[in-house]
Image (cartoon, grey):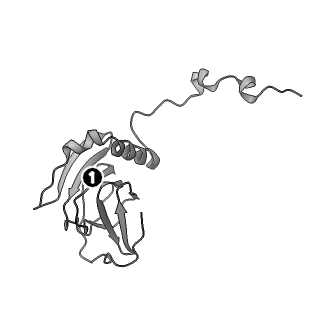
Amino acid sequence: MNSDSDLQIAGDILEVQHLLQPAREHPSTVAEFVGLARNIAADRAQWAPLVRYDTTTRWYHRVHTGPGYEVWLLSWVPGQGSGRHDHGPSSGVLTVLEGRLTERTERGARALHAGAERVFAPGYVHEVVNDSLEPAVSLHIYYPGLTEMPMHTAQCAPAAVDVVPA
């Protein structure tokens, strides 16, 4: 019986360069876009100086673009909301960086605290609102880049219905 470990038999995989997958320069999967959102969220020094608050309209700023995708930073003062909408052909990742937001869909409402993430596919209809007493900041990644945001007239469920902690 051979007592050598598989590593000793096969060698160090890191030394067999032709077997390694090259690191991707840009995300291309849902998991990689979520990873990008987490990396940006973790680097507060990168995004915090960019944040502005506007009491007359939601403030937003595009912080990064890549092949086919965009990264946006949004601020929300108390009472501001997006209105009920979808993102056309774009998929997305929404990450709350500071504060608390509420996402409303036809299925109910979900409280999103700092660190909460939502991933959505094209055609996903929701409304995001800051119904707290403190400002909030969120990060949004869209793939492909956001080209349309159709508004919907029917109301989403009120915040008191089916609130699920993030």
Name the spot of residue 100 as percent of width and height, x first. Answer: 30, 62
The tally of labels here is: 1
Q: Residue at x 20, y 42 (%)?
A: 49
Q: Please identify the residue farthest to the front as the structure is shown.
A: 133
Foreground residue among 36 and 44: 44
Q: Residue at x 33, y 57 (%)?
A: 89
Foreground residue among 10 and 100: 100
Q: Please identify the residue farthest to the top as the structure is shown.
A: 15
Foreground residue among 30 and 103: 103
Q: Is residue 98 above or below residue 5?
A: below
- What is the quadrant of residue 151 in the picture? bottom left
Foreground residue among 118 and 152: 118
Quadrant including the N terminus: top right
Q: Which residue is mark 1?
A: 146
Q: Secondary structure at mark 1?
A: loop
Residue type for callout 1: Leu
Q: Please identify the residue farthest to the right as the structure is shown.
A: 1
Q: Residue at x 21, y 55 (%)?
A: 75
Name the spot of residue 160 as percent of width and height, x first. Answer: 34, 78
Q: Is residue 112 left or right of residue 18?
A: left
Q: Please identify the residue farthest to the left as the structure is shown.
A: 56
Q: Is residue 64 left or right of residue 39?
A: left
Quadrant including the C terminus: bottom left
